[in-house]
Amino acid sequence: MRAHGAEVVDLEFKSEGNGWILRVFVEKLGSAEINASTEQAAVDLDLCGAVARELSPALDVADLIPHRYHLEISSPGVERPLRTKRDFVRFAGKKAKLKLHNAVRGQKVLTGILGPFEGDAFEVKDGGQTYSILLDNIAGARLVFEFGPAPKPGKKKK
């Protein structure tokens, strides 16, 4: 993958309607180190195809999965999952939706702006409220993509 300028950022292996799917999520090589935005880290279809053509036969030779499955190579996307402390640090200042194991001030789902990390906790600003969230309390998290404002009628996009 490195030969193609990509690196693995996440894996998903699950059963879906048509059988098992192995999803390998990739982004441009070095994106995490430079705190690249989702746009800067994005990969295109040609790169995903090249990675798939290289990875598929390697997985067949290694024979790690004992049954049939489909291989998919993809970008994690603009609403990418956040799984590690590094992800939360990288995307501080961005909007995210968090699902919590245990409610914080009565909330098990929060959508807000990610704040700085201090120790094992980080802040989330949701409207006028600021919450301190422990990383261990995260059941699931992902970035939230927001469309910009709609152009006014009669105005052309630039």
Image (tube, rainbow, N blue to C red):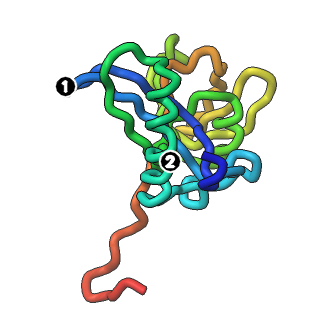
Q: Position of residue 67 (x, y in %)?
A: 33, 16
- Asked whether the residues under the numbered discs 1 and 2 touch, taking CB atoms below 8 Å apart as contact, a structural biologist would say no
- Name the residue located 55 percent from the left edge and 18 percent from the top edge: 104
Residue assigned mark 1:
17
In the image, is 35 to the left or to the right of 42?
right
Count of numbered circles on the image: 2
Tag 1: amino acid: Gly
* In the foreground, 135 or 58: 58
Q: Secondary structure at mark 1?
A: loop
Tag 2: amino acid: Val
* In the foreground, 148 or 27: 27
Work out how far the residue at label 1 is from the one at label 2, CA to CA, in angstroms. 25 Å
- The image quadrant that residue 15 belongs to is top left
- Name the residue located 30 percent from the left edge and 22 percent from the top edge: 68
* In the foreground, 111 or 75: 75
Q: Position of residue 12 (x, y in %)?
A: 44, 27
The answer to which of marks 1 and 2 sits earlier in the sequence is 1
Q: Which mark is residue 51?
A: 2
Q: Position of residue 102 (x, y in %)?
A: 51, 11
- Name the residue located 66 percent from the left edge and 25 percent from the top edge: 132
- The image quadrant that residue 138 belongs to is top right
- Reply above or below: 10 against 95: above
